Amino acid sequence: MNSQKIIYSILLAFFVSIFSFQTNAQSTAVEELHKLYIKTINTGDSGNLNALYTDDISIRNSDGSMVAGLNNVKEQYNATFDNGDYEITLKTIEEQALNKDFKFVSGAFVFTKIDEPQMIQKGTFVNTLKNVEGQWKIDKSYRFTETTNNKDIVDGLYQAFSAGDIPVVLAALDEKVVWMEAEGNAYADGNPYIGPDAVLNGVFARVGAEYDYFKLEDIELHEMSDNKVLATLRYDAKVKETGNTFNAQVAHLWTLKNGKIMGFQQYVDTKKLADATSK
């Protein structure tokens, strides 16, 4: 799947819908979908999965593993139900309509194994819902367990970006995040970007408009002191206007607090970027 095309479509839809971080009331459709999901988990009835998920469903599990396709998802659920009895509670935090056929829903969950050996797992989810012939179904699902491991949080953010799930990336940012592009980078003209909306409009939207593809490769994460994570990686990209490509060495310094991204500083070979955009 071309992740850049996904990014373009999401960004375009966001501008049309005027992306907002305000909490919206839970709709009846989402409420009914969540009730069915709770019933499925609490009863161990995998027969409800056809009504819950699209045929092309993709799920990022809480442990970071991925599963795609309804048949594979069914196998995963059946294996889980064969392993014990479970209960789940869901709380909707935000619901955002994208257009008449797509919406995003985020929330929190508590997943409990009620027989031996017992366990409790708490976390958050971000789902993309799709309207399939008048019925809302889950098309993509990202699940994150509660963690104070900053490296895991940043790793999840990179996975979401690579999959084109920009809403998940934005949801990881604190509402007062300070985002800094490298000096000499054209996008540094907006430094500092304050808040997720500024990052979306000033950075991600421009990337989507100006590049045929923009990939993150060879990512390595390094836990630092003072709630910081250093990422070393490479950008592999192609500029639309010039047709030039580049592969540049990059470092990102992330600052976190209470599981949220508070600060971002980019370091990159800006000469390679400038050469690629020059006609």
Image (cartoon, rainbow, N blue to C red):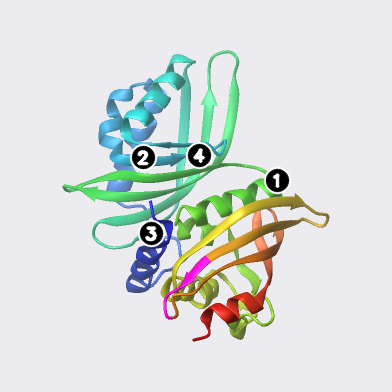
- Mark 3 or 2 closer to N-term? 3
Which label sits on residue 6? Answer: 3
Magenta segment boundaries in residue numbering = 237-241
Mark 1 lies on a secondary structure that is loop
Q: Is residue 11 visible?
A: yes
Q: Amino acid at mark 1?
A: Thr
Placement of 101 over or under 47, stated as above or below: below
Please tell me which residue lies in front, 197 or 43: 197
- Report how far apart the C-alphas of labels 3 and 1 lie in the structure: 30 Å
Which residue is labeled 2 in the image?
A: 34
Which label sits on residue 109? Answer: 4
Which residue is labeled 1 in the image?
A: 148
Which is closer to the viewer, label 3 or label 4?
3
Q: Amino acid at mark 3?
A: Ile
Q: Are marks 1 and 4 in contact (CB under 8 Å)?
A: no
Callout 2: 10 Å neighbours few (<14), some, many (20+)? some
Residue at 37% over, 57% down: 25
- Report how far apart the C-alphas of labels 3 and 4 lie in the structure: 27 Å
